[in-house]
Image: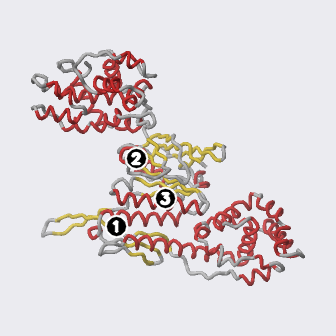
Amino acid sequence: MTILEITIENVKGIQSLTIKGRVFKNRPNILVACNGFGKTSIATAFKHAANQTSIKLPDEARHQYDEARSAKISLEVDEDGTKKMLSVTELAHSNDIRKHFDIHVISDMRKIKASAKNMGGFSRASAKQVIDPIVICDKPKDAASPYKITDAKRTFGKHSSLLLNLNDSIFASPQFLMRSTEFIQALNPLLKPGQWAKIEAIQTKIANHTGSDQDAIESVKADIQQLFSDTYFHLAEEIIADTSGFDQNAVFLTLWQIAFVSRSEQAQLQDYLECLRYKEIKKSLKTHVADLNTSWKAATVKESRGKLVVEVPDPSHISNGQRDILLLVAMFHVAKYQLTKGKAIFIIDEVFDYLDDANLTVAQFYITELIEDYKRQGRAIYPIILTHLNPVFFKNYVFSNQNVIYLNKNQTFDSIDAMKKLIAARQDKGVGDTTKNNISKYLVHYHVDAFDFSADLAAISGTRSSWGKNGKFQEFLKEEFQKYQSGQAYDPLAICAITRRSVEALAYNQVLHLKDARGFFDEHKTSPKLDWAAQRGATIPETHYLLRVIFDDGLHWNLGRDNTIPIVAKLGNPIIKKLIIELVSKSLGGSDAGGALA
């Protein structure tokens, strides 16, 4: 199953948001958006729909705190070529999503604890970061196994040697134990008389067969196939097969044994499997925490007051990186315990954004490990990582199969093909060096000389040859800037170009009276040009250097990597937009030797 589209309505900062990028199973799905976009609102929506029959949204999480606004989450999914809509609202029993997916959300678990001391008539307040013991899950009561292979063989009758000891096979499989909660739910309908009779009929055929064990099991092969084609039996068969590697015959024999025990000891078997599952999670947790205990104050895993908990040392006694990874390990094990269905939506809200490189690599390892666990168990997990860091530029997320989705709640902006191909030509081996140099010198950088290389541009398919004539490209940039300034759809690459040209023009205007002013153009990059001018008395605002992150991203382009969405996200930031408008407007209004558009 693939999630094609997610729509969220009336949660925190979101009135209505549709995420159109596909979210794939068993792959890291990275949703990138600038700060202030509403990533935490996305996480909040799912958090209040998790483990609920409807969205349970507190008033402070409503859009504009308006009680009249009803929250809703909708998913469009594709399962084997069939599209369908799943949704959940605040109406009771409306959660269609929960019927198909578990949902789990993790976010920052750090807290600030305030305290005050009375200092003889006045109080002195202080605050420090604290991390309460992290509860992983309840500790189940101890339960003995109700299963005995001797009882199963005695009841099965002839050919009972076909039966495997469950304690050494399926009950010893970590993959099965992690799916045991789901399996018990799939098993319960099979214990009813009608379904059990179908299982018993095949067992009776095997027991009455007069040939060898192998002949006996082969004689019912068609019956087993027909049984497992029944919708009632499909999930139970799938879980055993996916977590054991058994063939269909062995799956049936295993199912018969479990069902046989469960018919008389259903509650005890369920408790026993829950106890085994708990031990598996506890074992994993202790191993991971022990791997991270490198400081003099170690985290501990313990059972306290009927719960499995992780006690993290006082944050002042461990490094920030160790603290964050310990929290992440704990939260992942909470998720492992709570996620019991075959499919799970797992949302991580900016937990990784402030990790250093080493710990970010470790965090990605844990996600990869979780995905691999789900694959081994035959399950599907949809990890959704919410972040403001663009993996294309920061190289922070390096999963081999990551799926990056850029979020933009504004209208879609795109550059025209002619602009993309013009910028891409700077790295195109098929374009001559003279043409490349002219594009760089006269179009994407500022220059005062007149030029005409329109014939050369005509040779580059898809570009506008007229841009090679003096003033034509500059007119195009000015038109796009006016659209950007007035809130209309604009060409993002054009805004990158006019921003760079304006930065350089304002610097050059301050030194054009010098005899060696043309030395400015001998520098081939923006920063060296600004440094050159500054060394000769020009005042270069720091913001002009900062804006390089805008135009460098846009003006170093190749057709194999579309940067438009992350560029638009930056250009849409209100502070960046204000800086650009002030900068370009100042340049356009200047009385320089040609202005930014000359």
Element class at badge 3: helix
Marks 2 and 1, how far apart at CA? 30 Å
Element class at badge 2: helix
Mark 3: few/some/many CA within 10 Å (<14, 14-19, 20+): some
Mark 2: few/some/many CA within 10 Å (<14, 14-19, 20+): some
Q: Nearer the viewer, residue 386 or 422?
A: 422
- The type of colouring in the image is secondary structure
Q: Is residue 444 visible?
A: yes
Look at 36% across and 53% down and name the residue there: 353
Residue type at mark 3? Answer: Thr
Sooner in the amino-acid sequence: mark 2 or mark 3: 3
Residue 65 versus residue 550 in the image, above or below: below
Residue 592 image point, x, y percent: 17, 20
Residue 472 versus residue 257 in the image, above or below: above
Residue 431 image point, x, y percent: 40, 26
Q: Residue 131 has which mark?
A: 1
Element class at badge 1: loop
Residue 162 versus residue 459 in the image, above or below: below
Label 3 belongs to which residue?
368
Residue type at mark 2? Answer: Pro
Sooner in the amino-acid sequence: mark 1 or mark 3: 1
Residue type at mark 1? Answer: Ile
